[in-house]
């Protein structure tokens, strides 16, 4: 349980008062309180366009809706109703996001109107910025992820799709939710675009009477209304009108770099500093100092060393905390009055916005057990995070299989229903007949309608994991693998090849991977004849295979009907997974490489087997001849004797 | 329906911190457009996109023609103006490739995320110089020429070798040391603050510096036709390409063009081995066999070592 924090105050050092009605932004509850952090973060995101992306990690799914409503209300301000948010999920397509086509029936036939879609319509319009909500970022469609990459933090975005042609300056704010354990499945490129990332595992919203409510309890709207009422009026005003950037001191920059460490990306540093700058502006300070960097770090859950940082001259040391909390952790502070008296004074001996609670326990509500993930806004940095390969790219598509309303448009045909209408083709068809029809208005008749023909996704996939270091003693691989290659050829399967231990590998500590349209791709036979190297990053290869399979199967509507994973290995991995991830050999390896491979194989073994088959090809090398069987056991695979070159199955997995 | 937004807020080119190789590649391409394009690869957050836009604003006074990753093919090759069609007017609408040919540059952000069928279209036009549209009642064929500038984060996937080869030069974003990172953060934050000021001396200084850079490029463009390329430099180039195992001959040709542009930028009358040495990694790194397999784009010390004796003495 987190310690009950104090509510200290900082002396107002600025002659530039905070915006709004004069309510001080200092005096708020400190950062050990998830609800306080959430409210402040949403205000900052609303006030500063550069902080437009908010990612909440491990938020209880039942709280997504009230938090979204809260964000909408913060964006709208006190004087206007919040706009309904745009909710993105696994089924959204480019066609739905960027353009919106309306077909209206009328006295003279059908009229087609193409307008900017939901992601583009709010930009350039007056009023509060639109809000985009992603309830589960890891399950967002590829189109949604790509849209987020394009829009989040961008100064300009070009829309070039059938219908509107626009260059827009994005105004929308994004609220996304993701489980920390799923963060590895999301593109790091995309995660990096979320400027504000807050661990929210312990968040509870206040129920009626400011009592903490269990998630999902209480009347709809009560929780966020209680939270909203707890936001000081000055914050809400700043959120609505925005804040002017204040100068950022060199000490603040140095402190941000120190807090995030040397290996972090520039975007994270910039995001932290922009947050620090916004906090300083909300606090009415003329510039952002190292203290504001500390405050920003605590707000997003980055640990701040207990020892006070070196502070630049001219910045006061933080004063002793004021006694007593304002309320229970997990709730926002009581709304203060607008009078000058409510503004904290230096003589009060307190701190306000810059107050720093203990780094540990941040985001943990009363009664919630601390979790290792709590407090880490960058879970994808964990070496154990399972990562998807190229999650922003769609799968290769083929022309086999049934027609689909998803996928690349490869042509048009006369429509038999009103699904997936090819608008340009339909209007063009109608235009050809206008003169002949002699109607007063442009009309589109049912006979003009055409629908899109789309490429289908591959129905079968072969994933080959090739360990080149086990080649000695084994039969010729093309012969051993012939049954699988023939299956892939005849079923026109796509092929994913993962290679470990090749002599000419770009990085011998990591597995390599490529996707081919089929077994006839020249890279596939080339992969069957590579020379063996020294290192065997088998664990990394198995991990890549797991990622590839998960990526294939998670695509609703475009996933394969059947897939084979074929692993050719003697099981003797000698590169631990951590070494593959970091690229740095560390100490004695012993059996870690083997153990990591077996652990990674267990993840594949746990996958649904209705469409997945797994085989391990055993080259029959000694000693440790049982290792392929151990691996097969974890994979749930059959074992094929690869030593004789016969491809005969010798054991069930 | 077409709408433009006023005044892009892009960091001025002269204020982009570090990334000298990326800047040099763009400048060389501007001096000699026949280089045929620049591909910039690097991790996220290394100012690749900012640099391209800042360069276009500096050099051309406008943003580049941009191909977004979710563009539809009718926007790329051209089609009908839908609004006009609805009004009963069959009005063709030029595609991005035509726009790019007018301005000389097509910028593809996140080029490795572009759909395959769009890549095929761009490859066809870039390779043949002809945009032929036979669809939706259109029947046109035009000669087009444009340079491709693409940015990509290799973490998100690679590029097919055919498309890689269409980029004359390839450069990789450098990793900044702590001092440069501090300067970068300082610059970006200062820029964002100055944007709110009506009369910003900071922005005025930056614009003046951008103007000087533009003048330098203009002078180099005017001068480059007179820069001599000695035979021994050509021979050096051919041998260097042979040693790196570069696939095809486009690498050598581009290397010579780039060396010539560099000589012009530096005010030299003739290309020297030093000029060539400096541009060789840009021209050859993505044409090595390992790059074609998507393994690596990095120009390693081993690559330098292979060429060392060619340039000694």
Image (cartoon, grey):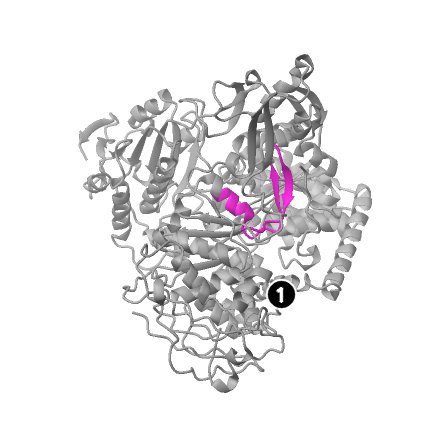
Q: Classify mark 1: residues with Cα within 10 Å, few (<14), some (14-19) or many (20+).
A: some
Residue A560: x percent and y percent? 36, 30
State the image coordinates of residue B239 (x, y, percent, origin top left). Answer: 62, 39
Q: Residue at x 42, y 59 (%)?
A: A224
Is residue A159 shown in magenta?
yes
| A40 w.r.t. B27: above or below | below
Above-or-below relation of A611 to B152: above
Q: Which quadrant holds residue B222?
A: top right
Question: Where residue B250 sits in the image (x, y, percent)?
Answer: 64, 35
**Chain on which label 1 sits:** A
Q: Which residues are magenta?
A: A145-172
Q: Is residue A492 left or right of residue A86?
A: left
For residue A346, side relative to residue A525 (left or right): right
The residue lying at 45 percent from left, 65 percent from top is A229
Residue ranking furthest to the top: A436
- Whether residue A276 is visible to the viewer of this picture, yes or no, is no
Q: Residue at x 38, y 40 (%)?
A: A502
Image position of A210 with respect to B311: above or below: below
Q: Is residue A101 left or right of residue A537?
A: right
Q: Is residue A154 magenta?
A: yes
> Which residue in the structure is indicated by mark 1?
A244
Image quarter of the N terminus of chain B: top right
Q: Nearer the viewer, residue A66 or A323?
A: A66
Q: Residue lying at the far left in this picture: please name it.
A: A651
Residue A365 visible? The answer is yes
Question: In the image, is residue A626 above or below residue A299?
Answer: above
Relative depth, front residue between B143 and A105 = A105
């Amino acid at each position: 349980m987190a310690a009950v924090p104090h509510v200290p105050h900082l002396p107002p050092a600025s002659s530039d008062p905070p915006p709004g009605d004069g309510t001080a932004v200092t005096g708020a509850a400190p950062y050990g309180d998830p609800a306080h952090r959430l409210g402040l973060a949403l205000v900052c995101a609303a006030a500063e366009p550069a902080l437009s992306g908010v990612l909440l990690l491990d938020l209880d799914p039942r709280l997504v809706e009230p938090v979204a409503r809260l964000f909408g209300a913060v964006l709208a301000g006190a004087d206007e109703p919040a706009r309904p948010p745009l909710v993105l999920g696994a089924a959204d397509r480019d066609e739905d996001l960027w353009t919106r086509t309306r077909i209206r029936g009328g006295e003279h036939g059908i009229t087609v109107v193409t307008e900017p879609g939901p992601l583009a319509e709010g930009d350039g319009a007056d009023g509060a910025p639109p809000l985009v909500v992603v309830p589960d970022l890891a399950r967002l469609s590829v189109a949604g992820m790509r849209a987020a990459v394009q829009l989040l933090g961008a100064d300009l975005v070009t829309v070039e799709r059938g219908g509107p042609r626009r260059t827009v300056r994005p105004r929308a704010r994004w609220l996304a939710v993701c489980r920390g354990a799923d963060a590895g499945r999301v593109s790091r490129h995309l995660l990096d675009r979320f400027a504000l990332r807050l661990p929210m595992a312990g968040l509870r919203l206040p129920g009626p009477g400011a009592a903490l409510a269990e998630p999902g309890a209480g009347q709809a709207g009560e929780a966020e209304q209680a939270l909203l009422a707890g936001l000081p009026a000055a914050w809400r005003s700043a959120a609505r009108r925005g804040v002017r950037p204040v100068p950022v001191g060199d000490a603040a920059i140095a402190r941000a770099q120190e807090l995030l460490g040397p290996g972090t990306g520039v975007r994270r540093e910039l995001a932290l500093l922009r947050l620090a700058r916004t906090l300083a502006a909300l606090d009415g300070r003329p510039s952002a100092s190292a203290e504001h960097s500390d405050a920003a770090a605590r707000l997003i859950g980055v640990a701040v060393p207990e020892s006070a940082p070196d502070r630049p001259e001219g910045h006061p040391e933080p004063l002793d905390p004021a006694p007593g909390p304002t309320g229970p952790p997990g709730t926002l502070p009581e709304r203060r009055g607008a009078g000058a008296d409510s503004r904290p004074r230096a003589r009060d001996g307190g701190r306000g916005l810059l107050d720093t609670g203990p780094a540990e326990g941040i985001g943990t509500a009363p009664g919630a057990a601390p979790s290792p993930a709590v407090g880490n806004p960058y879970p994808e940095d964990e070496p154990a995070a399972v990562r998807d390969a190229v999650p922003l790219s769609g799968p290769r598509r083929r022309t086999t299989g049934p027609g689909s309303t998803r996928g690349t448009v490869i042509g048009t045909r006369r429509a038999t229903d009103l699904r997936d209408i090819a608008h340009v083709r339909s209007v063009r068809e109608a235009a050809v007949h206008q003169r002949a029809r002699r109607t007063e208005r442009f009309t589109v008749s049912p006979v003009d309608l055409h629908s899109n023909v789309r490429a289908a996704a591959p129905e079968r996939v072969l994933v080959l994991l090739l360990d080149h270091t086990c080649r000695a003693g084994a039969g010729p691989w093309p012969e051993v693998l012939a049954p699988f290659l023939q299956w892939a050829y005849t079923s026109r399967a796509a092929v994913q090849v993962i290679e470990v231990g090749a002599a000419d590998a770009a990085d011998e500590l990591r597995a390599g991977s490529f996707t081919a349209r089929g077994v006839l791709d020249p890279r596939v036979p080339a992969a069957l004849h590579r020379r063996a190297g020294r290192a065997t990053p088998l664990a990394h290869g198995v991990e890549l295979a797991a990622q590839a399979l998960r990526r294939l199967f998670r695509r609703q509507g475009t996933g394969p009907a059947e897939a084979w994973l074929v692993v050719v290995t003697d099981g003797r991995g000698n590169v631990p997974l951590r070494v593959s991830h970091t690229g740095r050999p560390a100490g004695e390896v012993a059996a870690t490489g083997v153990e990591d491979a077996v652990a990674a194989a267990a993840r594949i073994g746990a996958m649904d087997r209705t469409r997945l088959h797994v085989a391990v090809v055993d080259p029959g090398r000694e000693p440790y001849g049982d290792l392929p069987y151990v691996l097969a056991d974890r994979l749930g695979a059959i074992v094929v004797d690869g030593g004789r070159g016969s491809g005969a199955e010798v054991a069930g997995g | 329906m077409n709408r433009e937004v006023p005044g892009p807020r892009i960091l001025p080119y002269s204020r982009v911190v570090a990334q000298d190789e990326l800047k040099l590649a763009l400048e060389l391409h501007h001096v000699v457009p026949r280089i045929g394009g620049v591909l910039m690869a690097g991790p996220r957050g290394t100012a690749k996109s900012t640099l391209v836009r800042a360069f276009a604003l500096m050099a051309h006074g406008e943003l580049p023609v941009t191909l977004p990753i979710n563009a539809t093919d009718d926007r790329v090759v051209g089609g009908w103006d839908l609004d006009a069609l609805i009004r009963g007017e069959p009005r063709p609408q030029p595609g991005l490739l035509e726009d790019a040919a007018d301005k000389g540059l097509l910028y593809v952000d996140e080029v490795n995320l572009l759909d395959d069928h769009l890549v095929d279209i761009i490859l066809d036009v870039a390779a043949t110089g002809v945009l032929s549209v036979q669809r939706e009642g259109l029947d046109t064929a035009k000669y087009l020429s444009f340079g491709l500038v693409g940015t990509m984060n290799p973490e998100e996937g690679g590029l097919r070798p055919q498309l890689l080869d269409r980029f004359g030069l390839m450069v990789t974003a450098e990793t900044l040391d702590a001092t440069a990172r501090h300067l970068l953060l300082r610059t970006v934050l200062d820029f964002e603050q100055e944007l709110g000021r009506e009369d910003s001396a900071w922005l005025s200084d930056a614009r003046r510096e951008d103007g000087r850079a533009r003048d330098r490029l203009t002078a180099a463009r005017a001068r480059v036709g007179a820069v001599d390329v000695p035979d021994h430099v050509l021979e050096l180039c051919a041998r260097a390409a042979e040693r790196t195992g570069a696939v095809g001959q486009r690498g050598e040709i581009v290397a010579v063009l780039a060396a010539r542009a560099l000589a012009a930028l530096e005010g030299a009358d003739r290309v020297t081995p030093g000029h060539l040495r400096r541009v060789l990694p840009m021209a050859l790194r993505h044409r090595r066999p390992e790059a074609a397999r998507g393994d690596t784009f990095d120009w390693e010390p081993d690559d330098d070592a292979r060429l060392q004796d060619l340039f000694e003495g």
